[in-house]
């Protein structure tokens, strides 16, 4: 290329020049290796911000996340020095017969608080019992109360949600729960089959495991090694916590050892409303069919919505019909699990407006087997997609299909935030769109050929006038 650019007569000179540059660059590179680490940290949404010492420059950290443990010492953390230390790049909690914990004791992150967030943390439990506290309260003397993600070497139990010094045992592994305003705990469905999780080895005993904990408003999720273990909508104003501290637990009792490392947080904006179930797992309250005869194609069994795939049509929400169209859904995170029983077509209709017909003006998140994650524009819905991936009304997903085989559950997470659309399939972003028409609309699910099942249809509202994401600050 360079020979072409400068002419044939200069090729030999150019080769010698570039050989010299490459050689010098290589030598300099050996003496001064290039930076490999992220240089930014994001302040917490509490009153405190990260200190320079509390931020760790972590290689290959995920976009939007910040590491809060430096791998060397307990800077930014506070625990009983008899019990907590750093060993082999991990925070270690350890008790012995000679040095016991007289009560549950915690190592508390002091550099901020958690409100809406995604937390990723690796742990290894040698023996005993432990936990990860979030949105918790500091009760003094390294005592803590609040939500706890369970840590123990017991598959089928590790991954559940406990409320330390509060409401006690909350959500079992595999369950989705709604806690009502009076504090009643109601299991409304399944996020996973507990026995199947155990069989597939979702937890590695006495080895490194990774928790992902997601909190948005009153909606909580635990994921362990990529497998969702619980989901909860907490409507109890007296028992729930909407913010609080992060802490790591040593449990009183027999001698124990637990390690934690690779602790990363992504703070989410403070704009989530009260999450709600759109499908109650019992009947079609809050939904209607089009055409009306389509009701024979839909049924409910064991908390699951079943569709035969024929005739063509859809089931849709009725929220705006009770008051006015403004009570429909505009900005939200929509989560639903689905699985194909046969190959064929379906889809999720978003911001659906106008008269009922096949098909109404809307954005369709494709549900066709093999093409989940594609976008279809129905009725010339105003929006802008990637022209390189768009042909006619269809915008092909960004990456190869990551759908699971027929008969296995998939997760759709669809975010409509003002003019922006993001579609995730099994936690992988597969499509986006911009300049989407910001109109209240129904949410629909198509009957279009494939036999499918749906469950755990949850909507987390986004209140846009409260969207004030904190700016990043440098961490040196």
Image: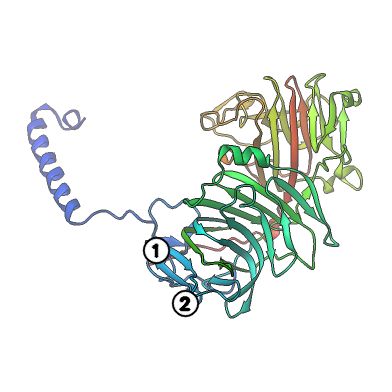
Q: Is residue 228 above or below residue 261?
A: above
Within-10-Å neighbours for mark 1: few <14, some 14–19, many 20+: many
SS at mark 2 in the image: loop
Q: Check the image and tell me how it is coloured.
A: rainbow
Asked if residue 335 lies left or right of residue 32, the reply is right
Within-10-Å neighbours for mark 2: few <14, some 14–19, many 20+: few
Task: Name the spot of residue 191 as percent of width and height, x first.
Answer: 70, 42
User: Which quadrant of the figure contains the N terminus?
Assistant: top left
Camera-nearest label, 1 or 2: 2
Depth order, front residue of 57/64: 57
Number of numbered markers = 2
User: Which quadrant of the figure contains the C terminus?
Assistant: bottom left
Instruction: Report how far apart the C-alphas of labels 1 and 2 lie in the structure.
Output: 19 Å
Task: Point out which mark residue 71 bears.
Answer: 1
Task: Name the spot of residue 131 as percent of width and height, x first.
Answer: 59, 61
- The residue at 81%/24% (across/down) is 313
Furthest-bottom residue in view?
Answer: 141
Task: Name the spot of residue 274 as percent of width and height, x first.
Answer: 76, 56
Task: Point out which mark residue 82 bears.
Answer: 2
Asked if residue 260 lies left or right of residue 252, the reply is left
Q: Is residue 256 above or below residue 212?
A: below
Furthest-front residue in view?
Answer: 97
Going from N to C along the chain, the mark reached first, 1 or 2, is 1
Depth order, front residue of 429/339: 339
Q: Is residue 444 above or below residue 319?
A: above
Depth order, front residue of 210/392: 210
């Amino acid at each position: 290329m360079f020979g072409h650019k400068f002419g044939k007569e200069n090729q030999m000179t150019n080769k010698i020049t570039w050989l010299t540059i490459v050689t010098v660059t290589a030598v300099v590179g050996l003496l001064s290796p290039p930076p490999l680490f992220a240089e930014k940290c994001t302040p917490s949404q509490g009153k405190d911000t990260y200190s320079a010492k509390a931020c760790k420059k972590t290689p290959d950290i995920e976009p939007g996340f910040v590491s809060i443990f430096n791998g060397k010492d307990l800077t930014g953390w506070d625990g009983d020095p008899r019990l907590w230390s750093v060993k082999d790049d991990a925070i270690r909690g350890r008790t012995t017969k000679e040095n016991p914990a007289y009560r549950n004791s915690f190592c508390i992150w002091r550099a901020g608080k958690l409100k809406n967030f995604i937390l990723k943390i690796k742990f290894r439990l040698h023996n005993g019992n432990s936990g990860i506290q979030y949105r918790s309260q500091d009760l003094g003397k390294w005592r803590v109360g609040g939500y706890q993600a369970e840590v123990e070497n017991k598959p089928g139990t590790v991954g559940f949600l406990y409320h330390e010094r509060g409401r006690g045992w909350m959500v079992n592994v595999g369950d989705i729960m709604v806690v009502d305003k009076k504090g009643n705990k109601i299991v409304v469905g399944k996020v996973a089959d507990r026995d199947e999780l155990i069989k597939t080895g979702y937890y590695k005993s006495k080895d490194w495991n990774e928790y992902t904990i997601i909190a948005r408003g009153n909606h909580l999720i635990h994921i362990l090694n990529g497998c969702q273990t619980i989901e909860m909508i907490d409507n109890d104003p007296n028992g729930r916590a909407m913010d609080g501290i992060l802490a790591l637990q040593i449990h009183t009792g027999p001698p124990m050892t637990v390690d934690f490392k690779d602790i990363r947080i992504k703070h989410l904006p403070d704009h989530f409303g009260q999450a709600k179930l759109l499908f109650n797992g019992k009947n079609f309250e809050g939904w209607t069919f089009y055409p009306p005869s389509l009701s024979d194609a839909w049924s409910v069994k064991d908390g699951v919505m079943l569709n035969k795939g024929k005739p063509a049509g859809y089931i849709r929400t009725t929220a705006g019909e009770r008051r006015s169209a403004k009570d429909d859904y505009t900005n939200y995170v929509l989560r639903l699990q689905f699985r194909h029983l046969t190959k064929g077509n379906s889809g999720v209709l978003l911001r659906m407006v106008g008269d009922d017909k096949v098909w109404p003006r809307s954005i369709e998140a494709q549900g066709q087997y093999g093409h989940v994650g594609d976008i279809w524009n129905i009725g010339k819905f105003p929006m802008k997609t990637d022209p390189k991936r768009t042909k006619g009304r269809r915008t092909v997903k960004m990456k190869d299909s990551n759908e699971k085989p027929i008969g296995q559950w998939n997760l759709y997470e669809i975010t409509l935030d003002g003019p922006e659309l993001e579609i995730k399939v099994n936690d992988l972003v597969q499509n986006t769109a911009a300049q989407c028409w910001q109109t209240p609309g129904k949410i629909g699910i198509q009957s279009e050929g494939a036999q499918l099942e749906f469950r755990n249809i949850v909507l987390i509202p986004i209140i846009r006038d409260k969207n004030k994401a904190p700016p990043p600050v440098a961490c040196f």
